[in-house]
Amino acid sequence: MIFILWIFFAILVGVYANSKGRSGFGFFLIATLLSPLIGFIIALVVPPINSKVEQKALEAGNMKKCPNCAEIVKVEAKLCKHCRSELA
Ligand SMILES: [Zn+2]
């Protein structure tokens, strides 16, 4: 039973790391081998890779790139929050 929980939390750590642009599988392995708690703490303290997080958001289709300042804004945005220009 504890083994199932161990794997379950290790997967959660992987999913969390993945959302920060980190290697989900790598963190899953760390969490499985060491402990899900240690894996989670490591995933918590490593800074997110912003370019990867942005790329993921673009691929998911809920963000777009402002044509004027190249910053990432929401797809629904009519006004860029970075440069205040109007978006088509
Ligand atoms: Zn802009």
Image: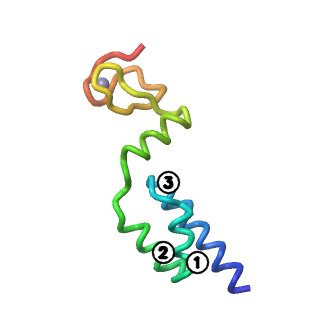
Give the Cα distance between marks 3 and 1.
18 Å
Q: Quadrant of the N terminus?
A: bottom right
Residue 19: mark in rendering:
3
> x, y (%) of residue 18?
51, 56
Mark 3 vs 1: CB contact within 8 A? no
Q: Residue furthest right?
A: 1
Residue type at numbered disc 2: Gly
Mark 2 vs 1: CB contact within 8 A? yes
Q: Is residue 80 depicted above or below 6 in this figure?
A: above
Q: Which residue is mark 1?
A: 32
Q: Nearer the viewer, residue 84 or 30?
A: 30
10 Å crowding of disc 3: few (<14), some (14-19), many (20+): some
Q: Residue at x 68, y 86 (%)?
A: 2
Instruction: First in sequence, mark 3 or 1: give its number.
Output: 3
Quarter-wise, where is residue 87 in the image? top left
Q: Which residue is mark 2?
A: 39
